[in-house]
Image (cartoon, rainbow, N blue to C red):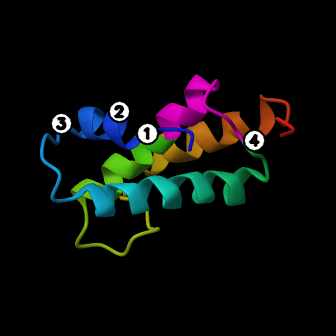
């Protein structure tokens, strides 16, 4: 995992365990979304990729009534900008 449950909960300001499973599933979905959107695999050393996942998880968590996998309209420009940078500005990390 690029981001941990603990750091994501801290970023979300969630201090209870009742939604850990949901948050973990959002973390996994965000990392898959990033890989599918860029065609690249990033690791935990790429701060922009980590911020992208935290931003996406936050958007999905705060807008749970919407379909997961869909980015909120307010976040779309930020997500698109980060994706463009991650796609074209970083060499692919080979695992």
Q: Which mark is residue 4?
A: 1
| Label 1 Cα neighbours within 10 Å, binned few <14 / some 14-19 / many ≥20 | some
The residues bearing labels 4 and 1 have C-alpha atoms spaced at a distance of 23 Å
Which mark is nearer the camera, 4 or 1? 1
In this rendering, position of residue 49 left or right of residue 94: left
User: Badge 3, how many Cα within 10 Å: few under 14, some, many 20+?
Assistant: few
Q: Secondary structure at mark 2?
A: helix
For label 3, the residue is 13
Q: Secondary structure at mark 3?
A: loop
The quadrant holding residue 6 is top left
Q: Residue at x 64, y 24 (%)?
A: 45
Position in image of residue 8 (x %, y %): 34, 39
Q: Which residue is mark 2?
A: 7
Whether tag 1 and tag 2 are in contact, CB under 8 A, the answer is yes
Question: Callout 4: helix, strand or loop?
Answer: helix
Closer to the chain start, of discs 3 and 1, is: 1
Tag shown at residue 87: 4
């Amino acid at each position: 995992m690029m981001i941990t449950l603990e750091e994501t909960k801290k970023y979300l300001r969630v201090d209870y365990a009742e939604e850990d499973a949901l948050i973990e599933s959002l973390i996994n979905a965000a990392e898959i979304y990033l890989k599918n959107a860029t065609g690249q695999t990033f690791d935990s050393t790429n701060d922009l990729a980590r911020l992208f996942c935290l931003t996406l998880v936050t958007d999905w968590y705060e807008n749970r009534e919407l379909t997961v996998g869909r980015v909120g309209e307010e976040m779309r420009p930020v997500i698109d900008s980060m994706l463009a940078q991650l796609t074209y500005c970083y060499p692919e990390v080979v695992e």
